[in-house]
Image: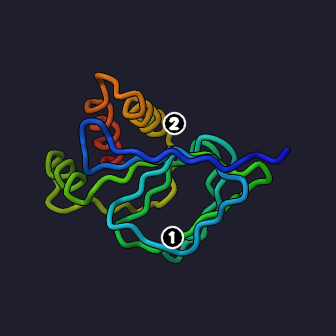
Amino acid sequence: MNQIDQTTYWRHPRFPDLCLLKARFTRHRYELHTHSTYVVALITAGCEQLRIGSRQVSAPRGTVLIVHPEECHDGQAGAAEGWSYRTLYPSTALMTDIARELGHNAPPVFARCAIEDPLLARAIDVAHRDAEQDGDDAEASLMTAMRYLVRC
């Protein structure tokens, strides 16, 4: 079955400088690129193969991917069915504020670029869905997910 690649991109209803992406890819391939923000992506189906910095990563369903600002990365299908994901692009300022709230003096630096933690995955999924629906809990669920991530 030949599925069509689909993407939806929007701004968070409570944090106008925070963008979100929901995508389903079977044929799409990202060339090596960077973002000025963090990238926090939850793989929701299939598998993504990617390079983050010098690391080669295979990210199946349930994996949370972390890319630091200005870190080179690419991406492509890691399985015949492709992959789906929900991605948040929090600014360095937002992540620094969250880190300071938790007692850190600098923007967070994550030792792992791929995290398999069902509680973190669930928190990111809830935050992303709340933002998609512009729900009353959109701000609280985002802050809960990002605080959990910074603690990882």
Residue sitting at x 20%, y 48%: 98
Q: Residue furthest right?
A: 1
Residue sitting at x 69%, y 46%: 46
Earlier in the chain: of badge 2 and badge 1, it is 1
The kind of residue on which mark 2 rests is Pro
Q: Are marks 2 and 1 in contact (CB under 8 Å)?
A: no
Residue 20, disc: none
Quadrant housing residue 29? bottom right
Task: Count up the numbered dots.
Answer: 2
Q: Is residue 54 left or right of residue 34?
A: right
Q: Is residue 125 above or below residue 77?
A: above
Q: How is the image coloured?
A: rainbow
Q: Residue furthest top?
A: 136
Residue 79, how many percent across, how many down?
Answer: 76, 54
Looking at the rendered structure, the secondary structure element under dot 2 is helix
Residue sitting at x 57%, y 70%: 51
CA separation in Å, label 2 and label 1: 24 Å
Decide: few, some or many residues near mark 2? Use Cα within 10 Å; few <14, some 14-19, many ≥20.
Answer: few
Decide: few, some or many residues near mark 1? Use Cα within 10 Å; few <14, some 14-19, many ≥20.
Answer: many
Quadrant in which the N terminus appears: top right
Residue on which disc 2 sits: 118
The kind of residue on which mark 1 rests is His
Which of label 2 and label 1 is nearer to you? 1
Looking at the rendered structure, the secondary structure element under dot 1 is strand
Residue 3, how many percent across, how many down?
Answer: 76, 46
Residue sitting at x 60%, y 64%: 75
Residue on which disc 1 sits: 73
Q: Is residue 96 above or below residue 131?
A: below
Of 64 and 45, the residue lying toward us: 45
Residue 105, how many percent across, how many down?
Answer: 14, 60
Q: Is residue 123 left or right of residue 140?
A: right
